[in-house]
Amino acid sequence: MGVIRYQEAEAEILRNGVERRLGYTDHLMMVIVDFSNGPQAHPDPQHSHTHEQITYVAEGEIIFILDGVPTRLAAGDMVLVPANQPHTIQLLTEQVRLLDCFTPVREDFLKPDQQK
């Protein structure tokens, strides 16, 4: 545990225009997701997971679709996502930065050597 500087955090490239950086403890994870591939004509496919999630929009604008209900969000907005709730996003601006917090830790985001 300790300080992680954004510039020094390992960036994982998820796909063209999408990268994430992780910070986590035993019970909590924060994920910074940077998008540079917007705007999108359509939302990403919906997904759900057993983790509780809070998403903070740090930069840009999105449509956050939670259980089929779309809401336009801009920098400074948050959304609370209960466990197992279907959700997705659609980018409205070219650049978007989201801060996602999860509990418990998303083991599926960790490399094998990071997992317990």
Image: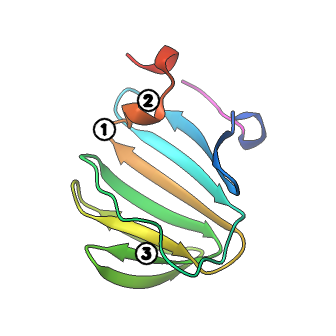
Mark 1 vs mark 3, foreground winner is 3
Q: In the image, which disc is placed on residue 92?
A: none
In this view of the protein, which residue sits in the foreground, 63 or 104?
63
Residue at the image position 72 percent from the left and 64 percent from the top? 36
In this view of the protein, which residue sits in the foreground, 76 or 90?
90
- Disc 2: which residue: 25
Q: Is 36 placed left or right of 24 in the picture?
A: right
Determine whether 8 is above or below 102 in the image: above
- Disc 3: which residue: 64
Figure colour scheme: rainbow
Mark 2 vs mark 3, foreground winner is 3
Chain part drawn in magenta = 1-5
User: N-terminal of the two: label 2 or label 1?
Assistant: 2
User: N-terminal of the two: label 1 or label 3?
Assistant: 3
Q: Is residue 95 magenta?
A: no
- Disc 1: which residue: 104
Under mark 1, the amino acid is: Pro
Residue 113 screen position, x and y as percent: 51, 14
In this view of the protein, which residue sits in the foreground, 6 or 46?
46
Residue at the image position 51 percent from the left and 75 percent from the top? 90
Dominant SS of magenta comes to loop
The N terminus lies in quadrant: top right
**Label 1 environment density (alpha carbons within 10 Å; few <14, some 14–19, many ≥20):** some
Most extreme residue toward the right is 7
Under mark 3, the amino acid is: Phe
